[in-house]
Amino acid sequence: MASQQMEHAQTTKAASPSWPKRLGWMALIWSASVLALGFTAGLMRLFMNALGLHGG
């Protein structure tokens, strides 16, 4: 029974990625979402300026 638990713990630990790798993926996804939001905001600004809508 104990050997099965140890084996399960080892396979579970090996299957989960390391913290730096997780943080790297989180930073990559966050950066991509910020870039996408900035791109969308830029497009909206272009369309609004083309329609004569000026903010501030």
Image: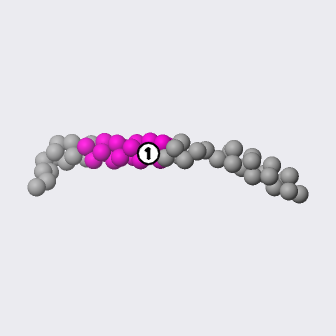
The image shows residue 42 at horizontal and vertical percentages of 25, 43
Looking at the image, can residue 47 be seen?
no
Q: Camera-side residue: 22 or 55?
A: 22
Which secondary structure, mark 1? helix
Q: Which residue is the extreme one toward the bottom?
A: 1
Residue 27 within the segment the image draws in magenta: yes
Q: Which residue is mark 1?
A: 27
The image shows residue 6 at horizontal and vertical percentages of 80, 52
Asked if residue 1 lies left or right of residue 47, the reply is: right
Q: Quadrant of residue 18?
A: top right
Name the image quarter holding the C terminus.
bottom left
Magenta part of the protein: which range?
A: 24-42
Q: Amino acid at mark 1?
A: Ala
Q: Camera-side residue: 17 or 44?
A: 17
Asked if residue 41 lies left or right of residue 2, the reply is: left
Asked if residue 11 lies left or right of residue 19, the reply is: right
The image shows residue 16 at horizontal and vertical percentages of 64, 47
Q: Residue at x 52, y 44 (%)?
A: 20
Asked if residue 3 lies left or right of residue 19, the reply is: right
Q: Quadrant of residue 38?
A: top left
Q: Residue at x 89, y 57 (%)?
A: 1
Q: Residues within 10 Å of mark 1 (few under 14, many from 20)?
A: few
Residue 41 within the segment the image draws in magenta: yes
Note whether 6 is above or below 28 in the view shown: below
Q: Main secondary structure of the magenta part?
A: helix
Q: Camera-side residue: 19 or 41?
A: 19
Q: Residue at x 81, y 55 (%)?
A: 5
Looking at the image, can residue 7 be seen?
yes
The image shows residue 54 at horizontal and vertical percentages of 12, 51
Q: Residue at x 35, y 46 (%)?
A: 34
